[in-house]
């Protein structure tokens, strides 16, 4: 009786062990089969992937493509220089002579001005050019400037740096009435002091000068200094008004290069008609500073970067000893270059070897 009760558990244990062993043998086979099915399905799915997915380029290739695109923009601007645009400012103004007086007629009016290729902007200009025509006289000359106002607001002309009589200083309500729209006004004086000077509006000037009412007024001395003699005499008017960062009314690549022969001396007359400082930097050769605001320096000094503050004029000499095309730009870099390439206050000094046309 006791034997019959104990026999069943033994048999159950033997059956359990036997069945467990069989399961241990069968389950890996089942799992293996399922894995094979999964691999086959994945393999079949992967076979069609190239038809539906775009391969992702490697980070290195993407970076190279970005670099190539940026370089292409930089190269395009350099190759375009000097780019042609409509209009040229700072052109020499030839006066008419009336009884020994040099007479200059200036008309200010609104025009469209092409700053860079394809970029036009509203300008208020003297005689349809930005900067206005360059007045160049000699110390002691008698001059008369007739101003006609075709603008929608009043204006005036201030002769910046010239020590004229008080009634010729051009400041409305202090030295004269404003020149109203449609009216004319005449300034006349004997040119007092030599040097690099300017003329510009002195009425709502932040807007009017910023939009182009400015020009160079150069006074040659009666007794020139021999050491200041130059083969090339170039005026560079800086501005940062509504037309952006400009040299003589244009932004790179439409700026004008300064061209000379190797061995020549170049005189550059910097004039800042803007509202920011602009440290002008010349590559390849130094500048010798000879005058500030029209007054000769007690002793010339050398530099390669010269800071031009608003209203200042600096005269420098460059001995063109180093042939090549040398970059010449404002060294506040956002005034001259971006990821898209050079722009704004950039030009070049081109020193040609003898015999090169």
Image: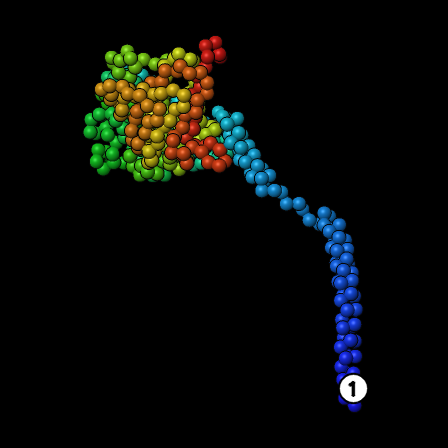
Q: How many labels does the image show?
A: 1
Which of these two is toward me, 249 or 208?
A: 249
Question: At which x and y percent is residue 100?
Answer: 27, 15
Question: At which x and y percent is residue 281?
Answer: 37, 26
Rendered image quadrant of residue 202: top left
Farthest-out residue, top: 355
Residue drawn at x 51%, y 33% is 118
> From where the camera sits, is residue 32 visible?
yes
Dot 1: what SS?
helix
Residue drawn at x 79%, y 76% is 15
Taking 247 as reference, is 267 above or below it? above
Question: At which x and y percent is residue 342?
Answer: 46, 31
Q: In this view, does 83 lie to the left or right of 36?
A: left
Rendered image quadrant of residue 33: bottom right
Taking 266 as reference, is 209 above or below it? below
The residue labelled by disc 1 is: 3
Question: At which x and y percent is residue 30?
Answer: 78, 64
In which quadrant of the rendered image does the N terminus lie?
bottom right
Mark 1 surroundings within 10 Å by alpha-carbon count, few (fewer than 14), some (14 through 19), many (20 or more):
few
> From where the camera sits, is residue 136 visible?
no
Residue drawn at x 77%, y 53% is 44
Which of these two is toward me, 155 or 234?
A: 234
Taking 336 as reference, is 144 above or below it? above
Query: Coloured how?
Result: rainbow
Rendered image quadrant of residue 183: top left
Residue drawn at x 63%, y 45% is 56
Farthest-out residue, left: 166
Q: Is residue 115 left or right of residue 52?
A: left
């Amino acid at each position: 009786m006791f034997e019959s009760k104990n026999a069943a558990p033994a048999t159950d244990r033997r059956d359990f062990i036997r069945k467990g062993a069989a399961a241990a043998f069968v389950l890996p086979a089942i799992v293996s089969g399922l894995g094979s099915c999964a691999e086959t399905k994945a393999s079949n799915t992967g076979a069609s992937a190239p038809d539906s997915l775009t391969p992702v380029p490697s980070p290195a290739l993407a970076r190279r493509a970005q670099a190539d695109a940026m370089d292409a923009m930089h190269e395009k601007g350099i190759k375009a220089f000097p780019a042609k645009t409509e209009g040229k400012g700072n052109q020499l103004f030839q006066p008419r002579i009336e009884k020994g007086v040099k007479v200059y007629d200036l008309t200010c009016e609104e025009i469209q001005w092409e700053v860079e290729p394809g970029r036009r902007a509203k300008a208020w200009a003297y005689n349809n050019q930005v900067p206005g025509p360059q007045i160049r006289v000699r110390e002691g000359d008698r001059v008369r400037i007739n101003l006609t106002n075709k603008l929608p607001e009043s204006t005036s002309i201030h002769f910046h740096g010239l020590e004229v009589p008080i009634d010729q200083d051009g400041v409305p309500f202090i030295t004269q009435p404003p020149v109203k729209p449609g009216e004319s006004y005449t300034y006349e004086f004997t040119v007092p002091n030599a040097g690099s000077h300017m003329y510009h509006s002195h009425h709502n000037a932040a807007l009017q000068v910023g939009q182009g009412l400015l020009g160079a007024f150069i006074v040659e001395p009666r007794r020139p200094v021999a050491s200041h003699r130059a083969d090339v005499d170039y005026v560079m008017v800086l501005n940062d008004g509504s037309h952006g960062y400009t040299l003589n009314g244009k932004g790179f690549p439409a700026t004008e290069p300064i061209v000379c022969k190797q061995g020549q001396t170049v005189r550059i007359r910097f004039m800042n008609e803007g509202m920011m400082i602009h440290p002008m930097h010349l590559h390849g050769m130094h500048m010798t500073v000879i005058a500030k605001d029209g007054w000769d320096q007690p002793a010339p000094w050398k530099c390669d970067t010269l800071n031009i503050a608003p209203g200042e004029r600096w005269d420098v000499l460059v001995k063109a000893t180093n042939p090549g095309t040398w970059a010449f730009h404002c060294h506040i870099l956002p005034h001259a270059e971006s990821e898209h390439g050079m722009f704004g206050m950039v030009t070049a000094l081109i020193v040609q070897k003898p015999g090169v046309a």
